[in-house]
Image (cartoon, rainbow, N blue to C red):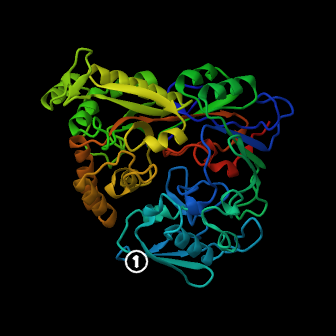
Amino acid sequence: MTARTVRGVAGATLAAALITGVTACSTPGATGAATDAVVVGTATEPESLSPLLGYGKDGNSKIFDGLLSHDADMKLKPALAEALPEVSADGRTYTYKLRAGVKFSDGAPFSAKDVVFTYRTILDAKTNNASKTELDAIEGVEARGEDTVVFTLKYPYAPFAERTVLPIAPEHIAGRQDVNSGDFTTRPVGTGPYVLAGWSKGEKLSFKANPGYWGGEPAVKRFTMAVVKDDDVRATRLRSGELDGAILPPNLAKGFEKDPARRTYAAKTFDYRNVTLPTHHRVTGDVSVRRALDIAVDRTAMVDKLLEGAGKPAFGPVPADSPWFTAGTERRHDLDRAKKILDEAGWKAGEDGIRVKDGVRASFPLWYTSGDKIRQDHALAFASDAKKAGIEVRTEAGTWEVIEPRMKTDAVLAGGGSPADPDFDQYLLLTSSLGGDGFNNMAWYDNRTVDRALDEARRSGDPAVRKAAYDTVQRELVRDPGYVFLTHIDHLYVVNDRWEGPTTQVEPHDHGLGSGPWWNVESWKPKAK
């Protein structure tokens, strides 16, 4: 998949809009607007800025660097390492030679001990990093002098190099405080192109250029992420000139399609929307209900009507145009077959059309996050399709603080997706051992065949073995779905057209500070007038 660039806001997509160029209250392009500042409007905000707790684990964290990073085509390139790693013949040893002369933003030198500290701390049982199982393959990490780091793996984990885009934290600061609650979580120090200048929770994060950055001081001197969670509010603030751009769903983005001062970037993604079907609920825990819902939904209509064509039907975490997708696992919309599955399982329609089995009414709540128009639209469409099959889905809006305690039994309109490797998409989502572990395996899905296949896929360095294992996983999701996957969503970004350099990458689910046309904001230059 490749990113594409278009002019105007082709009403097609969910997504995020980059807000460039305004630091004072000025309309885009207005006289007096700062020429060295970029403001990003986003609906999301990190909980912590510490990579030890998971911040920036997929790269592009701005404050930090990893050993490696991605280019525009999502290919790995050196960052704090001076070259790609040397890998042993058995695939179990990765050796990184570090870039010379790199310093943290406080002036302290970066060295191999910081890399060792970062990885060992994340893997420590006391560290509250929900993604630490992504580093399960590491057996040991050691420094050889100041400029070399060697990782030893338990097994030849094929995508390990992708995991070394993880940001490196300074031992001399983070190592002297509590990893979970110390000041470093909100006052970080890194080697990246930007330094945190301020963080007003729920409002904005402000960054300033790091003059000592090893890649050269950025031309964009000030970089701000404005946090505006409600889609309509972002559109209003964008239209008033308070913001240069905003994260908007298609129907709101259409209002800016004729704006000549902005340029629109549409990025292909692995970002999916799905419905969790918790196994601890008497209705969604019934595999017949899950199978029926999986084919009762009209995914094509969702793409056409909700996304206006900017996306594709989702049949699992892997997009259908990925080489890792398993042909034949597409689910055709088949309401008659869904009804038959429910009939045969003993779910009989009551007087009001809602099915009942053993005195249990086929009804359950479906939560979505307040202010998220895309999730709301998906939730309502899912509920409408489910009702046609005789299942009542009661949609509810709430914050994550309200939703998270209910996830064991209540369905959620969720999202995810990572383009780097199928292990990243599927392991945390489906492994039974992670059921109920925060936002991992939110459905408490428990399928032993899937567990075995996921383990086999991550422990093999043979692409054919891995492909066969992921084929098994995807076929099991047809037979025994724990989620109903709805759509993969393209991301749309509106950018004030004053800079040379904005591009897009193939993007993950998380799109905010690290993804979007500003993934490489440190390399932007003002357009010549």
Give coordinates of residue 158: x percent, y percent: 37, 64
Height in image: 481 above or below 384? below
Q: Decide if residue 441 is on the left or right side of residue 390.
A: right
268, 224: nearer the viewer: 224
Q: Residue at x 20, y 20 (%)?
A: 349
Q: Decide if residue 205 is on the left or right side of residue 168.
A: right
Tag 1: Cα neighbours inside 10 Å, few (<14), some, or many (≥20)? few
Name the quadrant containing residue 17: top right
76, 182: nearer the viewer: 182
Q: Residue furthest right?
A: 32
Q: Residue furthest left?
A: 344
Q: Residue at x 25, y 56 (%)?
A: 469
Q: Residue at x 64, y 56 (%)?
A: 49
Give coordinates of residue 214: x percent, y percent: 71, 65
Q: Is residue 353 visible?
A: yes
Which residue does the numbered mark 1 point to in the structure image?
A: 88
Height in image: 273 above or below 464? above
* Residue type indicated by callout 1: Ser
Name the quadrant containing residue 452: bottom left
